[in-house]
Image: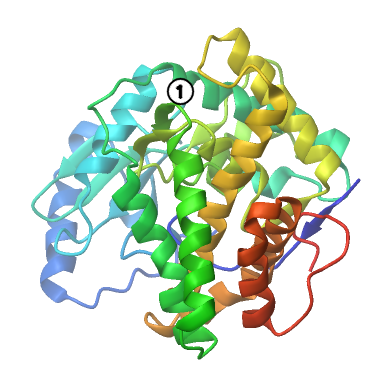
Amino acid sequence: MTASPSPAPENPTPVEPARRIEPTEAIVWADAARSAAFDGWLAGLVGTQRLRPETVRPASADASFRRYFRIDANDGTTRIVMDAPPDKEDSAPFVKVAALMREAGVTAPEVLDWDQRHGFLLLDDLGRRTMLDLIDPADADASRPRYDEAIDALIRWQLASRPDVLPPYDRALLERELALFPQWYITQHRGMAVTGKLQERLERSFKLIVDSNLASPSVYVHRDFMPRNLMVRDDEAGDSGGAPSVGTCLGVLDFQDAVYGPITYDIASLLRDAFLSWDEEFVLDVTVRYWTAARKAKLPVDADFGAFYRAVEWMGLQRHLKVAGIFARLTLRDGKPKYLADTPRFIAYIRATAARYMELTPLLRVIDEVEGNSAASGFAYGRV
């Protein structure tokens, strides 16, 4: 079985995979005052953090207003700097969730310094390669050890769950997310009016999806738990990028939007990825591995795997509809056209799941009308 690789477009919220950049590449600042504030902050850390300011260079960026730089330390290691303008990005959730993850035994960046006024953070460096970088899309068997690592990190995170610590993933939030699909994908991207039968079908389907998702027990939810946001330290990746060594632990990024909600969300996110699609046999195998580990850990997953898998698929629908809307919005509103390159993958996810369940036939009809083609025969994940 194989996965269907895709180009590497920008992610809707997560950090773009780190890329190697020469120290000579300059950092560009649109605001001279912010540039001066950054230089002053960095200079103040030279003694305590033993940094080399002359080595600071771009590391990566994401779909938000955040940027990431890499800087060398005197001991030969590197650190990451987050540039998050406070008028556009609130870094407090990042700092809070990073601490929660580390308390849970999950590898997450340590916040070494935080200039709250200007939105600069100094973090330890979790490496340059993501799990996605090291996966061979043509070799599912070789990829299983990485997914086992991801499951281990996810179980640790969920076991630490407590109510009233993170924002609730409640009906209001679920409905706001789903509304992105008709607003941005159908109306703005496809140029279709959401009225009449199409609107009625969407509303009926959305209610079923939200009701299903709210029926799942709640735990901590990362909300973008996928290979693109899971880091492998350079000393653990191996020269060939092969199987992980014993005892390694994937680092986790892009967790600032974490909530307290359905236990099905993160496993759906891991296996129904924005940038990588697996055959159903592999998806089932890894889902069973997670479900077995979760039951052993006494997490509140359904005792019947069939019922659990159905809930995961319906949770995946929530995510796919939301992300299709976000991709369209980022393209049309924010001028980032690369996002729509992977939208067909999400439409394929939506169609495949809607075709499996009779009660979701109205949603399947909507997708066929919007996309202007017939429902696909058979079942596959993201074969587009």
On the question of residue 127 being in view, the answer is: no
In the figure, 348 relative to 367: above or below? above
Residue 307 visible here: yes
Helix, strand or loop status at disc 1: helix
| Count of all numbered marks drawn on residues in the image | 1
Give the camera-side residue of 20 and 22: 20
Q: Position of residue 51 (x, y in %)?
A: 30, 42
Name the colour scheme: rainbow
Snapshot quadrant of residue 347: bottom right
Q: Residue at x 10, y 71 (%)?
A: 33
Residue matched to label 1? 158
> Residue visible at 52% across and 41% down?
225
Residue 303 placed where, x, y %?
63, 16
**Residue drawn at point x = 39 percent, y = 35 percent:** 261
Q: Residues within 10 Å of mark 1 (few under 14, many from 20)?
A: many
What is the quadrant of the C terminus in the image? bottom right
Question: Is 236 above or below relative to 78?
Answer: above
Q: Quadrant of residue 28?
A: bottom left
Relative side of 193 to 30, left or right: right
**Towards the viewer: 95 or 262:** 262
Viewer-proximal residue among 60 and 371: 371
Q: Amino acid at mark 1?
A: Gln
Q: Residue at x 66, y 38 (%)?
A: 310
Residue at the bottom extreme of this rendering = 191
Q: Could you tell me which quadrant the N terminus lies in?
A: top right
Is residue 7 toward the left or the right of residue 321 in the image? Answer: right
Q: Residue furthest right?
A: 1
- Return the x and y of residue 309 as percentages of the image width and height: 67, 34
Q: Is residue 339 above or below residue 4?
A: below
What x and y, as percent, mark residue 214? 43, 38
